[in-house]
Image: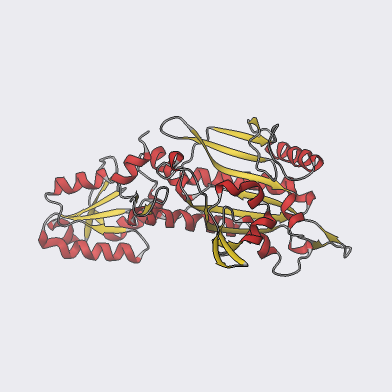
C-alpha cells in the first residue's frame, strides 16, 4: 500500500495549504467527483432501506451542547464559542446527534413511525491538536456519513443487525477490507453518562446483534453515552482506524425528553442508535486511496473514460464521443495536448483512468473507438454505442 498523503496529491484528489489551515484539506475536482459518486450511492442505499435524509446546520447555540452533554464531556475537543452577544454564543458542532434530536422533536411522534431513521452527510468539527493531524485520516473539518435511529427497546437488536448488514453491503461495493471488529465498552476511571443498568442492557444488546461475527472487546473505548461496535481497517503503515460504527444511547433521549405515543396512548422513551456505514468522507477516502492504490472501481473513478484522438484531424470525433459519454452520465475528458499518443496513454495510466478511448482516422471514419483498459489490455475497435454500453454498465452506481 502507498501512503494516501503522497498518492492523493499525485492523483489530484486533495491538496493542503497552510493558508487554509492544518487539518483542513481542499478537495480537488478529481476527489470531489469520486466523493460525489460515493455520497450518491450511500444516500440511495440508505433511502432504499428506510432512511429519511435531512440537512442541519454545523453551528448550534451553546445551550444545545450543554443539553447534549458534549460541552461537559467533550469540551477539550470542541472549538471555542463565537460570542454574538452577551447572552448568545454559537459553537461549531462536534457531532450531528444534537441536531437530529431536534429533528425528532419537530413534532409529536407515534409508535407507528418507529423506527425513525434520520440520515445526513453532515459537517462537524473537532479541535484536534496539530501533532495528530495527518492527510485525510485525521482532520478538523469532518463530513460524516451519519444516521440516528429512534426506536423502541424491543427493536434495538433488529436495527443493529440491519445496520451491520448495510455496512457489509457498503464495504463490498467500495472495496473495503475489514481488519477487525471491536466491541467498545466502559473502562475504569473514565466519565460516562447513564446508569449501570442501562449500560449493561446496551452491552448485552450489542453482543447479541454481533451474533457469530468474530470480535474483540475493548474496555475503555466506549463513547461517553454508551457502548459501540467499531469496525476497523488498516492503513499503509499497518495502523488501525475506526471506519464504521454503531452505538447505543439511552442518555440523549432522556436529556432531550424524547418520547412517542404507544398503542395504548401512553408516552414512552425511544432508544437512540447512532450509526455510520463508512465513517467520514475524509477517513474513508484516505483508506480507499491506499487500498486501491488510486485505481478506484469504475463507478466512483474521478474520470471513467479519457478520450485520445490520434491526430488533430480526428479531434472533432473525439469531442463528439466525449459529448455522447457525458450525456449518459459518464465522467469523461479529452486529452489532445499531452504530446505523443504513447505519452498520453502513459499519463492516463498514471492517473489510473479505467478506460482510454483511442480514436484514429479509421475509427473516426467507421464511427468506432478502440478501448484500452486499465492495466494495458486493448480491445478491438467497436461501435461507439457498444463502447458506451460497456463503460456504462461498469460505471453505474451499485444497486
Q: Quadrant of residue 253?
A: bottom right
Query: Which residue is at 79% across, 41% downward?
Result: 201
- In the image, 36: left or right of 12? right
How many numbered discs, if any?
0
Query: Which residue is at 74% across, 50% downward?
Result: 251
- In the image, 1: left or right of 369? right
Image location of residue 118, percent across then percent down: 63, 59
Q: Is residue 98 above or below residue 156?
A: below
Q: Quadrant of residue 226?
A: top right
**Residue situated in front as seen by the camera: 354 or 27:** 27
Query: Which residue is at 55% across, 47% downward?
Result: 77
Image location of residue 184, percent across then percent down: 65, 36
Q: Is residue 51 visible in this depiction of the protein?
A: no
**Residue situated in front as seen by the camera: 51 or 127:** 127
In which quadrant will I find the N terminus? Answer: top left
- In the image, 249: left or right of 356? right
**Residue situated in front as seen by the camera: 295 or 225:** 225
Image location of residue 252, percent across then percent down: 72, 53
Instruction: Give the image's coloring scheme.
Output: secondary structure
**Residue situated in front as seen by the camera: 50 or 145:** 145
- In the image, 166: left or right of 345? right
Image location of residue 11, percent across then percent down: 30, 47
Q: Is residue 140 above or below residue 206?
A: below
Q: Is residue 222 visible in this depiction of the protein?
A: yes
Q: Is residue 186 above or below residue 330?
A: above
Amino acid at each position: 500500500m502507498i501512503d494516501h498523503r503522497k498518492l492523493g496529491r499525485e492523483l489530484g484528489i486533495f491538496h493542503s495549504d497552510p493558508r487554509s489551515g492544518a487539518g483542513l484539506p481542499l478537495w480537488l475536482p478529481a476527489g470531489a467527483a469520486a466523493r460525489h459518486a460515493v455520497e450518491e450511492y450511500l444516500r440511495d442505499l440508505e433511502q432504499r432501506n428506510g432512511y429519511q435524509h435531512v440537512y442541519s446546520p454545523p453551528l448550534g447555540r451553546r445551550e444545545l451542547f450543554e443539553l447534549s452533554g458534549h460541552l461537559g464531556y467533550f469540551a477539550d475537543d470542541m472549538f471555542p464559542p463565537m460570542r454574538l452577544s452577551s447572552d448568545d454564543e454559537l459553537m461549531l458542532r462536534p457531532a450531528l446527534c444534537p441536531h437530529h434530536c431536534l429533528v425528532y422533536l419537530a413534532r409529536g411522534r407515534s409508535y407507528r413511525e418507529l423506527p425513525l431513521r434520520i440520515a445526513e452527510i453532515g459537517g462537524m468539527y473537532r479541535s484536534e491538536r496539530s501533532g495528530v493531524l495527518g492527510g485525510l485520516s485525521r482532520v478538523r473539518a469532518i463530513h460524516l456519513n451519519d444516521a440516528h435511529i429512534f426506536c423502541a427497546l424491543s427493536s434495538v437488536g433488529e436495527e443493529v443487525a440491519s445496520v451491520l448488514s448495510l455496512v457489509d453491503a457498503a464495504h463490498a461495493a467500495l472495496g473495503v477490507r475489514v481488519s477487525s471488529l471491536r466491541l467498545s465498552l466502559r473502562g475504569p476511571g473514565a466519565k460516562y453518562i447513564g446508569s449501570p443498568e442501562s449500560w449493561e442492557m446496551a452491552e448485552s444488546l450489542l453482543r447479541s446483534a454481533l451474533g457469530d461475527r468474530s470480535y474483540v472487546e475493548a474496555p475503555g473505548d466506549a463513547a461517553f453515552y454508551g457502548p459501540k461496535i467499531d469496525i476497523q481497517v488498516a492503513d499503509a503503515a499497518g495502523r488501525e482506524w475506526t471506519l464504521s460504527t454503531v452505538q447505543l444511547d439511552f442518555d440523549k433521549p432522556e436529556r432531550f425528553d424524547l418520547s412517542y405515543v404507544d398503542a395504548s396512548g401512553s408516552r414512552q422513551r425511544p432508544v437512540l442508535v447512532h450509526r455510520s456505514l463508512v465513517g467520514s468522507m475524509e477517513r474513508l477516502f484516505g483508506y480507499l486511496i491506499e487500498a486501491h492504490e488510486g485505481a478506484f472501481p469504475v463507478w466512483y473513478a474521478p474520470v471513467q473514460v479519457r478520450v485520445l484522438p490520434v491526430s488533430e484531424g480526428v479531434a472533432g470525433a473525439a469531442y463528439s464521443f466525449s459529448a455522447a459519454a457525458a450525456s449518459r452520465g459518464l465522467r469523461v475528458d479529452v486529452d489532445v495536448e499531452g504530446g505523443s499518443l504513447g505519452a498520453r496513454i502513459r499519463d492516463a495510466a498514471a492517473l489510473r483512468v479505467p478506460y482510454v478511448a483511442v480514436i484514429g482516422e479509421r475509427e473516426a471514419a467507421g464511427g468506432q473507438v478502440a478501448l484500452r483498459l486499465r492495466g494495458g489490455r486493448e480491445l478491438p475497435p467497436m461501435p461507439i454505442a457498444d463502447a458506451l454500453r460497456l463503460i456504462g454498465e461498469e460505471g453505474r452506481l451499485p444497486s
